[in-house]
Amino acid sequence: MGELIASFHGSYRTGPDVGAGPEGMVVLKGVSPYAYCAPPEHGGTGDSSGPTATGVLAALRSGARHVFGDASCAGRTVVISGFGAVGSGIAAGPAAEGAQVVVSDVEPSRKAQALASGYGWGEPAQALSPPADILVPATVGGVLDDETVPHITARLIVGPANNQLTEERTADTLADRGIVWIPDFAASAGGIAYTLGRESHTAPMRRRCGGWRASPTPSAASSRRRDRPASPPCGRPGGSPNAGCPPPRRPPRGGGDVPANPAATP
């Protein structure tokens, strides 16, 4: 796996997710610099679930301000599907503001923890459909589709689960129902920004036309020069660093392929 990640020369980067924690990143870092969140003693930032939850809460408050006219969750019902490291961190925010927080998780042992924290508990099979103002998908992806969307009562969906839409057109279905969906790659960007900000020195990045790109290894750069000319670096002698460069491409509506979130789920 580490060799496969290394073969992309930084265009794909990875971190902990379902089934792979910081210790697993130690193994990957042995063959690729593009594995993040290894334990600090191995040169990584360790667990990034806290910064990820912080970023989701910022997106949640921004979305609440847009939908309800008030960033506070006081008096609202927030349903969180997934009560792992990130989900539990998210739950604490709305609860502190006076929201009714209901959580669910496929791991039965987490029910006692949720109830002890003062949260309501919902069965995982109905995690997306209970009455709610705000829905937070914080488990695996592919949860918003033609079967689940018609049963969603929340007016705002914002969460860190990766690739929540099964199809891009689902974003239009949500919009037609008056539901505001904040894409996962925006909602969970806090963890990515935190990690790259602290570990980017281990896998350098440089500014090129079209956005930030990873610096290729010398062998990759040599191969690219032989095969085709490289994109010209941004900027012109004596001019602006971005002179002549097109703006970075926006992702397609409804999501699209994005780098894996280092810590979207437990």
Image (cartoon, grey):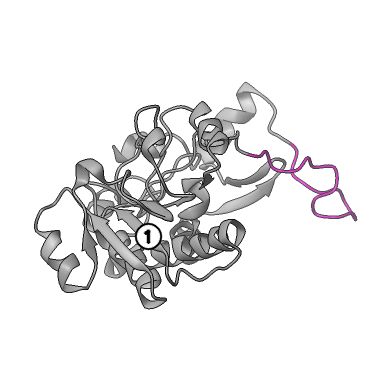
Give the vertical position of 72 relative to 241 (above or below): below
User: In the image, residue 35 lies at what x, y percent?
Assistant: 37, 50
Picture quadrant of residue 23 = bottom left
Residue 50 in sight in this render: yes
9 or 14: nearer the viewer: 14
Up-down relation of residue 225 to residue 21 (above or below): above
Residue 224 or 256: which is nearer the viewer?
256
Q: Amino acid at mark 1?
A: Val
- Residue wearing tag 1: 78
* x and y, in percent, of residue 27 in the image: 24, 50
Q: Nearer the viewer, residue 71 or 249?
A: 71
Residue 195 locus on image (x, y percent): 44, 61
Residue 110 included in the magenta stretch of the image: no
Q: Residue at x 50, y 39 (%)?
A: 11
At a point 30% along the width and 42% down the height, the residue shown is: 140
Q: Is residue 243 left or right of residue 107?
A: right
Furthest-top residue in this view: 227
Main SS, magenta region, reads loop
Disc tally is 1
Residue shown at the point (48%, 30%) measured from the top left:
170
Under tag 1, what secondary structure?
Answer: strand
Stretch of the chain drawn in magenta: 232-250
- Position of the N terminus, as image quadrant, is top left
Packing grade of label 1 (10 A; few <14, some 14-19, many >=20) is many
Q: Residue at x 57, y 52 (%)?
A: 205
Judge whether residue 236 is colored magenta: yes
- Residue 230 position by quadrant: top right
In this rendering, does residue 256 appear at all?
Answer: no
Question: Within the image, what quadrant is residue 246 found in?
Answer: top right
Q: Which of the pair 203/92 is nearer the observer?
A: 92
Residue 245: horizontal and vertical position, in percent? 79, 42
| Placement of the C terminus among the 4 image quadrants | bottom left
